């Protein structure tokens, strides 16, 4: 690698790392799919079977064997959610919150390099999970949870090995940095405010196969990661006696980030057109509850768990790429994202529902070493009911749409 190439790599990596703290779920549950602008343009269809840039590390490490030469990829996605929640409490009081989810930036970076004609390695930074919900102080849902935030960022080191000219396997190790804050309130007073951070660890593996020229198939698995957000707990209501009197202490939140399985296919139709598809299963059944533990509180005075009991969820996507000329490629895609939460599991902290993705994108080759990609997605969410018997609340997701705009830069060394 040249000195100028090294400077560019570290400068772009530093830029992405500096932007880590802002992200927002756009997929089912609190999953984040924004791993590249190129992928966004095709609704992330075929991602485990497409090896056009270094971002494939996030979806199928085995495909690194088919990335051409050393490559850096960096991208930033801007997510603008439009979430509106109507709610009603047991006293008949109502509220409408029209800005429940915050705008966010989702940065990613990847570097993939072949060692020889069989072995490749790569490193990347991206996120798979994160969300923020924020209700007004006068909302009727604040005791259930007026502010919730989980931010995670995944650092992934991987290797890929070509077993044959058309067959590769890969394995990766992951370190996940997570931060979180969960807040419930009564009026302007904090009933409970818990925040903490942690590192979690996991692994990922994949296989990539090109049975004939123009046909590629990929499959990948990413393990679940256990997180314990250790930090502090606070309440403004200690003077009211138990259980609040115990809640000014250190505390923690147990959280499971689910495993992900993906199967993809890429098919070259002719010299200009390729079509691709993916099936992704997120193993949300491991996400059973959000449990807050306050260290000084006895068992009887612990905050009640937020039971989730999610189901595993599926995401189906199809897309196409059209090579307009030697420099310009055009993309489009569609995806249907099933929610893991039914009406009996959906919560005000995570107001999730089924989604449809409609996407467009383009890629442009600047020269023999550099290219840029753009992607846009409109996400249309299905209206859905919310029931929280523990706090006597009911409500409806009136709107859960989102706009995503992403830009990406690729540099081949």
Image (cartoon, rainbow, N blue to C red):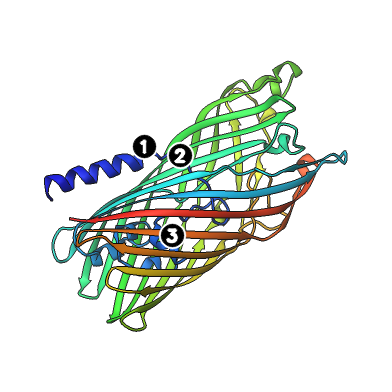
Please give left or right for residue 293 compared with residue 214 in the image.
right
| Marks 1/2: CA–CA distance | 15 Å
User: Mark 3 vs mark 2: which is more N-terminal?
Assistant: 2
**Residue 402 vs residue 148, the one in the foreground:** 402
Residue under the image location 73 percent in, 22 percent down: 242
* Image location (x, y in percent) of residue 410: 28, 56
Q: Nearer the viewer, mark 1 or mark 2?
A: 1
Between marks 1 and 3 in the image, the one whose residue lies nearer the viewer: 3
Residue 303: image location, x then y, percent: 67, 32
- The secondary structure type at the circle numbered 3 is strand
Quadrant location of the C terminus in the rendered image: bottom left
Secondary structure, mark 2, is: strand
- Give me the C-alpha separation between circle 1 and circle 3: 22 Å
Give the SS element for disc 1. helix
- Foreground residue, 372 or 386? 372
Which of pointers 3 and 2 indicates the residue nearer the eye? 3
Q: Distance between the residues labelled 3 and 2?
A: 27 Å
Residue located farthest toward the top when viewing the structure as drawn: 239
Q: From the image, tell me which residue sits under label 3.
A: 375
* Mark 1 surroundings within 10 Å by alpha-carbon count, few (fewer than 14), some (14 through 19), many (20 or more): few
How would you rate the neighbour count of disc 2 (Cα within 10 Å): few for under 14, some for 14-19, many for 20 or more?
many
Q: Residue at x 49, y 37 (%)?
A: 228
N-terminal of the two: label 1 or label 3?
Answer: 1
The image position of residue 172, as x and y in percent, is: 31, 54
Query: Residue 178 got which mark?
Result: 2
Residue at image position (57%, 59%) is 379
Q: In which quarter of the view is residue 407 placed?
A: bottom left
Compared across the picture, whether 408 is left or right of 336 comes to: left
Residue toward you, 86 or 264: 86
Numbered circle sitting on residue 18: 1
Specify whether 26 is left or right of 214. right
Residue occupying image coordinates x 65% and y 26%: 298
């Amino acid at each position: 690698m040249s000195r100028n190439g090294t400077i560019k790599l570290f400068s772009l990596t530093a830029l992405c790392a500096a932007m880590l703290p802002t992200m927002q779920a756009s997929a089912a549950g609190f999953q984040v799919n924004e791993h590249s602008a190129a992928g966004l343009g095709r609704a992330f269809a075929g991602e485990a079977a497409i090896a056009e840039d270094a971002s494939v590390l996030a979806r199928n490490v085995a495909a690194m064997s088919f990335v051409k030469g050393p490559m850096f990829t960096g991208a930033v996605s801007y997510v603008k959610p439009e979430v509106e929640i109507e709610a009603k409490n047991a006293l008949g009081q109502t509220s409408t919150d029209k800005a429940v989810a915050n705008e966010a930036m989702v940065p990613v970076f990847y570097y993939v390099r072949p060692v020889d004609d069989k072995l490749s390695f790569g490193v990347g930074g991206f996120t798979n999970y994160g969300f923020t919900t924020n209700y007004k102080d006068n909302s009727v849902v604040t005791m259930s949870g007026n502010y919730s935030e989980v931010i995670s960022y995944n650092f992934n080191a991987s290797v890929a090995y070509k077993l044959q000219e058309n067959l590769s396997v890969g394995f990766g190790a992951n370190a996940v940095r997570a931060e979180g804050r969960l807040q419930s309130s009564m009026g302007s007073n904090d009933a409970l405010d818990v925040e903490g951070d942690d590192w979690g660890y996991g692994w990922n593996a994949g296989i990539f196969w090109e049975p004939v020229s123009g046909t590629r198939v990929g499959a990948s698995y990413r393990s679940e990661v256990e997180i314990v957000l250790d930090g502090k707990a606070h309440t403004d209501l200690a003077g009211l006696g138990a259980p609040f009197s115990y809640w000014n202490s250190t505390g923690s939140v147990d959280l499971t980030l689910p495993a992900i399985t993906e199967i993809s296919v890429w098919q070259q139709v002719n010299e200009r057109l390729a079509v691709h598809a993916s099936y992704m299963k997120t193993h949300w059944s491991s996400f059973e509850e959000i449990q807050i533990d306050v260290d000084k509180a006895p068992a009887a005075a612990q905050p009640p768990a937020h039971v989730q009991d999610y189901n595993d969820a599926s995401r189906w996507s199809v897309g196409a790429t059209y090579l307009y000329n030697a420099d310009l490629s055009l993309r489009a895609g569609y995806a249907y994202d099933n929610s893991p939460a039914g009406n009996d599991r959906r919560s005000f902290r995570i107001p999730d529902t089924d989604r449809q993705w409609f996407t467009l994108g383009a890629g442009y080759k600047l020269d023999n070493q550099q290219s840029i990609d753009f992607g846009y997605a409109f996400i249309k969410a299905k209206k859905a009911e919310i029931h929280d018997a523990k706090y006597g609340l009911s409500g409806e997701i009136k709107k859960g749409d989102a706009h995503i705009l992403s830009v990406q830069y690729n540099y081949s060394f």
